[in-house]
Amino acid sequence: MSLQSEPRVSAGATFLDYGLATAARLLNSAGMDVEQGAKVLRTMLSRWGDREITQHPEWPSDVCADGSPVEFSAAISDHDVQIRVLVEAVPEEPSTPAAQKSALGLTQALIEDFGAVGDRLAAVSDLFLPSEDPTGFAMMHAAIFTSTGAPEFKVYLNPNANHGMTGSERTHEALDRLGFGKAWESVAAYARRGFDLDRIVYLGLDLSDRPDSRVKVYFRHYDIAPADLDACMEVSAHHEAGLLGEFCRKLTGRTGELRDQPIVSNLTFTDAGGHTPVSATAYVPLWLYAESDRIIRDRVSSVMADIGLPSGRYRSLLNEMARRPLSEGCGIHTYASVRVQQGRPRMTTYWSSELYDRYPPARYQRG
C-alpha cells in the first residue's frame, strides 16, 4: 500500500525547523545536551536547512524510504543510549555534481566546527566523488550523540558513483588505499553468492583518527533467508550465531526470505582488528512487513524485552519522534538491528522523518 500524504509538518516549516525541534525532543528525553545537539544540527543543515519542506522531495534522498533527507535513530543497551542523526545535504539543483558540492561543503564544516578528521575520506574521495559522469547520491553524513563526550561523525559513500567501475571494484580499491587490502578476502567470502545477490551499497568511514576508527562495507542481500545470512556473518570475529533468524521472524512476522524489501548488513574493520571484521551487523527492514507503526512498536518492544533491554526507553523516544498516531501509517520505522558483544546486546531502531509519505513503497529492488 502506498498513500501519498501531505508533509506531516506545519505549513511553511523548514528542514531546520523540523531537525532542531526533533533533535531537541529526543536529546532531552535521553538526558543529553540539547544545546550541543542544536549546534551540530545547525551545521549539518546549514547550507540547505532554511528551505521550506514541500509536498514532494526536490532531491529524493537515499536516507529514508520516502525520500526524506533526515533520519533519526536510537541505539539502546542495558547501560546507555545513543541518539543518531543521518542527513544527505540537499543540493541546490537536482543533480549528482551539485550533490557532491553540497556534501563536500558539509564535510569541511564538520572538520572546521567540530574537529572531524577527513584524512581517510580524502584518500578515496576521487573514487566516490568522480568528476566524470557521476550518478546517484554523493555522500551522507551522520552524527552520534551520547550522554558523555563530544559528538562523533561518519560518512557513507556510494560505491556505484559512476559506471567507470563496479561497486565491488571501487570498494576493493578503496580498502587497499585505506590499508585494508587483505580485508577483501573477508568481503569476498561474505558475498559468497556473488555481488549481484550480495550487493555492496555503501562504504562507511568514521571521521576520526582513533585506533578504533571504523571502515564499514554495507551490503544489500537479495533472496536470502535470515539463517543463511547468519551463517555468512560468522566471518566476523565476534558474531553471535543463531540470533538473526528469530530476530527477523519476530520483527516482520515472516519466516524464510524477505523478498518485499531486502535485508542490509555490514562488515566492520578497524586498525586494531586488522583484516578480520570486528563485527557483522544485519539491518532488518520493517515498513513493508506490518500494517502500522503501532504493530511494529509492539514487536520491537517484545524483542527488546526478550533480550533484556529496557523497552520503555525506546517507547519514550518513539513518542518524541512520532508526529501522528502510530496506527495511522507505517513509515516511521525503517530498520532495526541488534548486536551482541561479550554477552551484552544493543538494539538500534531507525526512524524516518516521514516528510513525504506515511506508506512508502519498496525500494532497491533487484534489476
Image: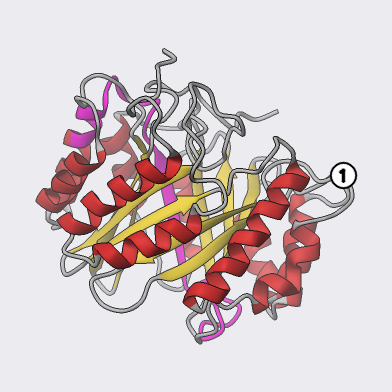
Question: Residue 207: where, in percent of width, then height?
Answer: 55, 73
How are the residues colored?
A: secondary structure
Mark 1 residue crowding within 10 angstroms, few (<14) / some (14–19) / many (20+): few
Residue at the (59%, 60%) spot, across then down: 106
Residue 31, picture quadrant: bottom left
Q: Is residue 29 left or right of residue 84?
A: left
Mark 1: which amino acid?
Asp
Q: In this rendering, does residue 339 appear at all?
A: no
Of 17 and 250, which appears nearest the observer? Answer: 17
Magenta part of the chain: 270-297
Residue at the (20%, 68%) spot, across then down: 80
Q: Is 295 in the magenta? A: yes
Q: Is residue 6 left or right of residue 146?
A: right
Q: Which residue is mark 1?
A: 133
Question: Residue 135: where, in percent of width, then height?
Answer: 77, 42
Question: Residue 179: where, in percent of width, then height?
Answer: 70, 81
User: Where does the N terminus fall, quadrant-wise?
Assistant: top left
- 102 is higher (above) or lower (below) than 104: above
Q: Is 83 in the magenta? A: no
Of 267 and 75, which appears nearest the observer? Answer: 75
User: Where does the C terminus fall, quadrant-wise?
Assistant: top right
Q: Is residue 103 left or right of residue 310?
A: right
Question: Residue 236: where, in percent of width, then height?
Answer: 48, 68
Q: Is residue 269 left or right of residue 100?
A: left
Q: In this rendering, does residue 114 appear at all?
A: yes
Picture mark count: 1
- 305 is higher (above) or lower (below) than 275: above
Dot 1 falls on a residue whose secondary structure is loop
